[in-house]
Image (tube, grey):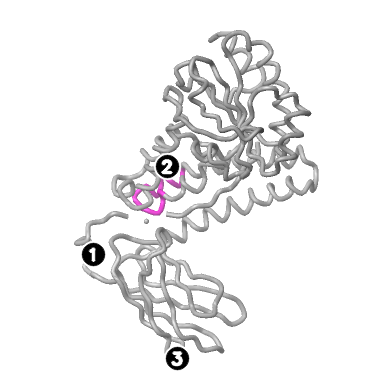
Amino acid sequence: MLNKLLSGVLAIAFPFFASAQSLFVIKGKIDSDKDFQNIVAINLVNGDTLGKAPIIGNSFNMSGQLKEPTLMVAYIDGVPRPIQLYIYNETVDLNVSLKDTFAVEVNNSKYHPEYQQFDAFVNKHFTKINGFVQKLNSGQGPQDSLYQQYLEAKDTLQTETMDFIQKHAESSITALLPIMVFELLEWDGEELELVYGELAPASQQSTYGKELKKLIEVMSLGKIGTVIPDFKQKDVDGVEVSVSEYRGKYVLIDFWASWCKPCRDENPNIVNAYNQFKDKNFTVLGVSLDNDRNNWLEAIKQDGLVWRQLSDLRGWQNEVSGLFNIGTIPYNLLIDPDGKIIAKELRGPALIQFLKENL
């Protein structure tokens, strides 16, 4: 499977009276031979400015008010690396070293240690998996062995992600973890709903929890048993095609790309299915995640894809694939004559068998 890692961000909904302190205060010291003028803190979720303070003698005091424990990034003028903090309305000490190496130390925070555990977990797994992805994409080393190790690393991530969520269910930042890993682990809306159910109510009602719930609602667009939303995209001749035009037929909506080797390997199976069932009220509609028109058209010709093909030539930013939050290809959805999704991710013999039993 080809994966895009996505990367995305999003904090706990305690009532305001839960904290005896009504403001956050960051007492900062910078260890550097240079002098700096200002530091500003930004909400990592929405980009709002949370606080700003002058730096005098490489020390500063910044204050502001938070509605919930919040993941913020602080920027020191002239320093390219941001500082990440996860705090609430509390007084914390921030020590930043800018001499030999960049180092950050956050003390006296009740909430920042939760982020440190979260960050260590994410870095451990993503560093390992990204290492395999880079080697696979560059062709380094024995590909079969590397791919197997990559799959094993994903399995480990899945197991340990669930363990982490169950152990830290009360923390709002835990709700960010499923948002970060769902594409890599190929979780659908139903699986995300199960993960959401593991979170404590306070975490569910936090900013991250609400974002996770929104994601689940979006993911349900591709859920079996739901009617596919109408979408439009241009075909190879520049004619805009709507999926609603296919009402009355069984349609396999196939997401692929010319550059995707697993997709190209699967294409003969789809051609076989098309030829077997095209006279039984069945057809295929291709949606390509290509960004090069010539490569797209050449692959259609080489692979004998005679059914209609759509693309906006925006690669992973394809509008239709984005509608279904598709993060891996090949991927497909099978809809019935009423436009209802009756199956998905049917490949090889499984596709032929399902069509035999249901058409």
- The reply to whether dot 2 and dot 1 touch (C-beta < 8 Å) is no
Q: If you read the primary sequence from the N terminus, does the residue marked by circle 3 or circle 2 appear first?
A: 3
Task: Decide whether the magenta segment is chiefly helix, strand or loop.
Answer: helix
Image coordinates for residue 204, horizontal then vertical, percent: 33, 46
What span is in magenta? 163-175
Query: In the depicted view, which residue is nearer to us: 254 or 330?
Result: 254
Q: Which mark is residue 215?
A: 2
The image shows residue 136 at horizontal and vertical percentages of: 73, 45
Image quadrant holding the N terminus, namely top right
In the rendering, at what x and y percent does residue 24 appear?
Answer: 31, 71
- Closest to the camera, between mark 1 and mark 3, is 3
Taking the image as shown, residue 105 lies to the left or right of residue 126, namely: left
User: Would you identify the image quadrant in which residue 146 lies?
Assistant: top right
Q: Amino acid at mark 1?
A: Ser
* Residue indicated by mark 1: 19
Q: Residue at x 56, y 56 (%)?
A: 123
Q: Secondary structure at mark 3?
A: loop
Which amino acid, by three-letter code, is at mark 3? Gly
Dot 1 falls on a residue whose secondary structure is: loop
The residue tagged 3 is 57
Q: Amino acid at mark 2?
A: Leu
Numbered label attached to residue 345? none
Compute the Cα span from label 2 to label 1. 30 Å
